[in-house]
Image (cartoon, rainbow, N blue to C red):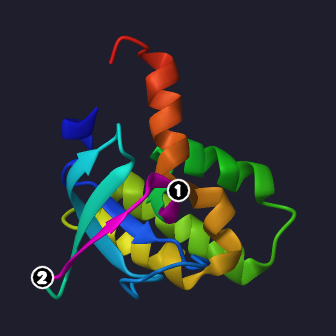
Amino acid sequence: MNDELTGKLVLVHPGLTHDPAGRQNEIGFIVNSDLADDAILVSFQDNEYASFTSDALLVLLPAEQIHQNLADMAYETSFPDLKALTQIDLLLRYGSGDKHFKALEMARDNKKIQPFCLDTLENVIAIKQAQNPER
């Protein structure tokens, strides 16, 4: 599981109450992880590194889940929020290049849609471990 996380894009939780690295709401990628100690090393665009726990990092939900969330909320949300989530959905499904980075930027910049397209790394790891208990 540690190897699967390497290279994964993450968003440092915007509501992080204790952030000694000062990286709230910044995007980086995982360069190393030690799940036994819940220590995730993240690199940022300025080539600086910081260590976080898995609950301090947000990741994109799978594209299928974002698409389903979009369909479920279509009549219950404002147009700007619906438009932002639609853009993320389309980008992940049909985009190319750095589509995950761009989608994460859009999610970062639209706080109201974050519950529909982001989850904590902690939850993602727990789900994967429940699906594959031998890992």
* 63 lies left or right of 75: left
Residue designated by label 1: 55
Would you say residue 74 is visible in this rendering? yes
* 44 lies left or right of 62: left
The amino acid at mark 2 is Asn
Position in image of residue 10 (x %, y %): 37, 64
Q: Is residue 75 above or below residue 121?
A: below
Q: Is residue 55 above or below residue 134?
A: below
Residue at 49% over, 41% down = 124
Residue at 18% over, 65% down = 97
Crowding at label 2, few (<14), some or many (≥20) Cα neighbours within 10 Å? few
* Among the two numbered marks 1 and 2 on one chain, the one whose residue lies closer to the N terminus: 2
Position in image of residue 52 (x %, y %): 38, 64
Residue at 52% over, 56% down = 55
Residue at 45% over, 53% down = 54
* 5 lies left or right of 52: left
Instruction: Find out whether residue 78 is within the magenta segment.
Output: no
- Which range of residues does the magenta coloring cover? 47-56
**Residue in the foreground of this view, choosing between 41 and 80:** 41
Would you say residue 95 is visible in this rendering? no
Occupied quadrant, residue 96: bottom left
